Image (cartoon, rainbow, N blue to C red):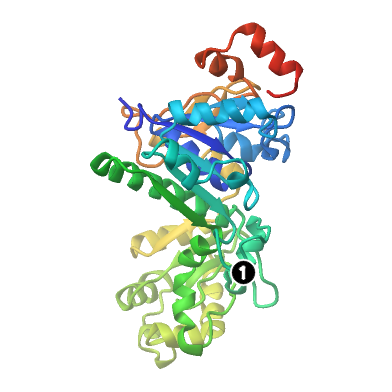
Amino acid sequence: MKPLKDITVITLEHAIAAPFATRQLADLGARVIKVERPGVGDFARGYDERVRGLASHFVWTNRSKESLTLDVKHHEAQAILRRLIVEEADVVVQNLAPGAAARLGLSYEALSELKPGIIVCDISGYGSDGPYRDKKAYDLLIQSESGFLSVTGTEEHPSKAGPSIADISAGMYAYSNILAALLERAHTGRGRRIDISMLESLVEWTSYPLYYAFDGATPPARTGASHATIYPYGPFPAGDGKNVMLGLQNEREWVAFCNKVLLAPELAADPRFSTNSKRSAARADLRKLIVETFSALTAEEVIRRLDDAQIANASVNTMHDVWEHPQLQARHRWDEVGSPAGTIPALIPPGFTQEDAPRMDPVPALGEHTERILAELGYTAERIAQLRAENAI
């Protein structure tokens, strides 16, 4: 039995934040009904065609869901949606434009009068009140607004995170808050409104540099792929042209690094490098010494020395490398899911095993489950055909 087997989630979602949250609820066994616009659907369906004609973002965040097409501006489609929520839903999730859900009568205040146990999770860029409430918000904009860009990139140029980190952080907080609300409801019988802001989510994740700049102090510098305040911690080139990522965390590791990796034990006592703060301040001099030593070694030889000294290290992998990663292969972390384009590989979510597998059902085609869901509500085939002719579904 999956933990959320008896939970039904109705979601009016697009892009990443809300779909990522609800996909994880589906992983745990929840029935997730995704309400999409007829003919178009979630606009993330059209971001690209990289997965056998399907969009990479959509494939990632939408497996195990049912797709129901409804034109929520149509009076009967609105009635269908409200009835579906009142009769079936435990949770409603939405990340529509600010104010849109309330105008459709889908606010927590309106729905809780009909169903006191309902949990409503609203995801937005800036939250439901305050001067930024109505501003449009996309992932890169929130990376900028949160200060994330100011500490990410090179000295000359700020850089965005490769993944949609603002969306992901908001999705994770939506997911965890919904789980907590379900636990609370089991004790009290009452639902809850959850107000998730992308800005607040990413500021929470950026709290280390925020505190580092506390009370007007200088913020962490942008240092590319190196750590801004710990050194050596970042990528270093080996003699064969490959890069090795390594990181030191304490003085014991610094001594081991000097003795067993650089083969220069005298550096351990060099006053220029005697503490992390001094090493970070003198990183240009120290990097020169490290690169000089590594230039006579292959990346494999550098990693062998680092492993022998028990210094943390990693390969600088490409996306293609990760598809073939030996650790993921050895731990059997890949499964397969269906899709409109056929079977595709999918990573088993962290925390699950193949013996205690998550729900990993197909990625839905647009409107794939519309007729079945309406039939469950008692609609006849004739009435469904009429609704389709009216473009209500």
> Which residue is found at the position 44% from the left and 51% from the top?
194
Image quadrant where residue 1 sits? top left
Residue 151 in the image, given as x and y percentages of width and height: 58, 73
Q: Nearer the viewer, residue 349 or 296?
A: 349
Residue 189 in the image, given as x and y percentages of width and height: 29, 40
Q: Which residue is mark 1?
A: 131
Residue 48 in the image, given as x and y percentages of width and height: 73, 38
> Which residue is found at the position 37% from the left and 72% from the top?
249
> Which residue is found at the position 45% from the left and 71% from the top?
207
Q: Nearer the viewer, residue 374 or 332?
A: 374
Q: Relative to residue 301, is residue 382 drawn left or right?
A: right
Image quadrant where residue 44 sits? top right
- Identify whether 122 is placed above or below 135: above
- Identify whether 70 is placed above or below 375: below
One can see residue 363 in this view: no
Residue sitting at the far left: 187
Q: Relative to residue 284, is residue 352 drawn left or right?
A: left
Q: Relative to residue 32, is residue 358 drawn left or right?
A: left
One can see residue 143 in this view: yes
Of the residues shown, which amino acid type is indicated by label 1? Pro
Report the quarter where the C terminus lies: top right
Residue sitting at the far front: 113
- Identify whether 292 is placed above or below 235: below
What secondary structure is marked by label 1?
Answer: loop
Q: Nearer the viewer, residue 350 or 135?
A: 135
> Which residue is found at the position 57% from the left and 67% from the top?
130
Residue 180 in the image, given as x and y percentages of width and height: 33, 47
